[in-house]
Image: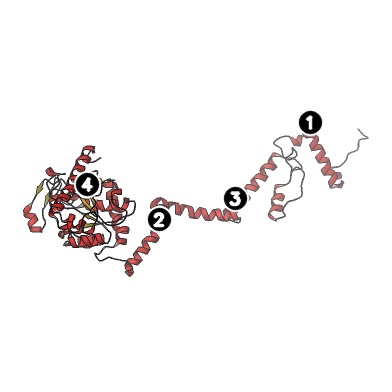
Amino acid sequence: MADAKVIPFDDDRDRPRGATARGARSRSAAGGAGGAGRRKSDKPGQPSPLAPVPGRRAADEQRGTGQRPEEPGDGPGPGRGPEAEADAAAGAGERADQDAGTGTGAAGAAGGTHEQERPANGLLDRMLGSDWDARASRGLAFLRRRITGDYEVDDFGYDRELTDQVLMSLMRPVYEKYFRVEVKGLENIPAEGPALVVTNHSGTLPLDGLMLQVAVHDHHPDGRHLRLLGADLVFMLPLVNELARKAGHTLACAEDAQALLERGEVVGVMPEGFKGLGKPFADRYKLQRFGRGGFVSTALRAGAPIVPCSIVGAEEIYPMIGNSRTLARLLGFPYFPITPTFPLLGALGAVPLPTKWTIQFGEPIPTDGYPPEAAEDPMLMFNLTDQVRETIQHTLYKLLVRRRSVFF
């Protein structure tokens, strides 16, 4: 023991750095190959004496040195301690969080912008629909044209743009959601040229004419527009007169009907008039007299086909159980209806019952094969009028037999 030589630890610093590193790697490899050769410092859970200092590594990377020189224990081998690997992973995660938070990278900047825009756009899409921006642009353009007067109105006061953009939009929810109208036989209205649609009239208030107009406007395969003929009273009431003209309605006279048919329009007429609209509930779906057949004469002169139309569901919206003739004379109305809810419930009684409607268009009756003088033949007009009336009445009976319920 006296001959033993003690080598101080400082002698390790006198050795070349490369030799020290090679020796360390040799010992590390030997310890990894055999479990018996592992030193105490290489036990799991303890840092390796040759692991890089975490502070120095982070400083090198923050200075932008790129790839730093390989140091002992950097590789994935057993020479690198578990705590060193955890420190490296934590440092990389912190740098990624900083880049994403500050938006220094291209992906961070783009992601931040999208994250800010997506919640706002998603909220508007859920509230207003995916095409809300396009609809808003169309609405602003429409308002600009209305203010500047840059829109067209025909000789009868028909404002097509106002009808398409506003009036139909107001009536469409009633048509689709409230009365749930089912339409059949729309293909019987010709794709072009004149046509005269003749239908029954009922319901105490003329909502059947409005629903008929929506049905042709929204569902005809060629986008035809129905021009209704209205009674004198419609064009005497304030506000109603203006709206009726804007929607394309005109006075129920032979001259106006003839002019519209000669222009190639689809014209709608209800020959029963107030007799059908204001008939008692006990007479529901029983057609009244069709006048003197003036609509047939008009169709013969224009050579327009006559399309019979039957409407089921309108009779029950205001069940008319009485008529106050005294109030009707005082107000200048043809009748004053009394229903189970009106005038007992006041304005609430004016809300129609939500019945289920069906509108069916029959096969057209041609008139272009008759000579011009046929419009003056009373027997021909009587026969054609009776044919149209019977067609509508039989169709009403068929639809009533097939109907499951008034409301469903």
What is the crowding at mark 2: few (fewer than 14 residues within 10 Å), some, or many (at least 20)? some
Mark 3 or mark 4: which is in front? 4
**Among the two numbered marks 1 and 2 on one chain, the one whose residue lies closer to the N terminus:** 1
Where residue 241 appears, as percent x and y from the top left, is 20, 62
**Among the two numbered marks 3 and 1 on one chain, the one whose residue lies closer to the N terminus:** 1
Above-or-below relation of 253 to 307: below
| C-beta proximity under 8 Å, tags 4 and 2 | no
* Residue drawn at the location 48% of the way across and 53% of the way down: 118
Between 293 and 151, the one lying in front of the other is 293
What is the C-alpha distance between the residues marked 1 and 2?
72 Å
Given the image, on which type of amino acid does mark 1 rest? Gly
- Residue under pointer 2: 132
SS at badge 1: loop
Where residue 181 appears, as percent x and y from the top left, is 27, 46
**Residue 241 in sight:** yes
- Residue under pointer 4: 311
What is the C-alpha distance between the residues marked 4 and 1?
97 Å
Q: Which mark is residue 97?
A: 3
What is the C-alpha distance between the residues marked 3 and 4?
69 Å
